Image: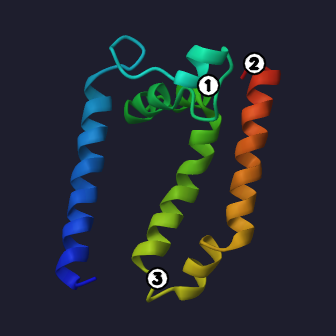
Amino acid sequence: MTRNTKLTLYICGIVGIAAILLLYASFDPAHNPFPRCIFLSLSGLKCPGCGSQRALHAIIHGNILQAWHYNAALMVSIPLLALLCFSGIAKNRFPTLYNRMNGRIVIWNVFFLTIGWWIARNIFDW
């Protein structure tokens, strides 16, 4: 991949993230026609991502406790996602960090924590 292609992808990614943040800052997903969770609609059970749209809206407006209430897993995963993005961008400078963040241990831990969150939030009604 050429340097110009990478730069274009980064710029498109930043513009896309900014557009999503602007959308969620402008409209409250709880009161607007945002997509609903298909899994919740069909089964009545919450998926690991249920509440993420409302949590994102709350984070943008600085209401961290409300965001935690909507989806605690999203709040916990934000630093991990930031580190994952950083490791991808700086993989040539920090190859060990990149290899660890994309290694089996991290991937399996995230998988099992996601499944655990999915089960726990339905048992305890989180």
The residue that mark 3 highlights is: 91
Q: SS for tag 1? A: helix
Locate residue 32: give its quadrant: top left
- In the image, which disc is placed on residue 18? none
Between 72 and 114, the one lying in front of the other is: 114
Mark pair 1, 2: CA separation: 11 Å
Q: Position of residue 73 (x, y in %)?
A: 64, 40
Question: Of discs 3 and 1, which sits in the foreground?
Answer: 3
Crowd rating for badge 3 (residues with CA inside 10 Å; few <14, some 14–19, many 20+): some
Residue type of the residue flagged with mark 1 = His
Q: Residue at x 54, y 26 (%)?
A: 51
The residue that mark 1 highlights is: 69
Tag 3 or tag 2, which sits nearer the N-term? 3
Q: SS for tag 2? A: loop
Contact? badges 3 and 1 (CB < 8 Å): no
Tag 1 or tag 3, which sits nearer the N-term? 1
Q: Is residue 126 above or below residue 62?
A: above
Q: Residue at x 57, y 27 (%)?
A: 50
Q: Position of residue 48 (x, y in %)?
A: 64, 35
Q: Is residue 38 above or below residue 62?
A: above
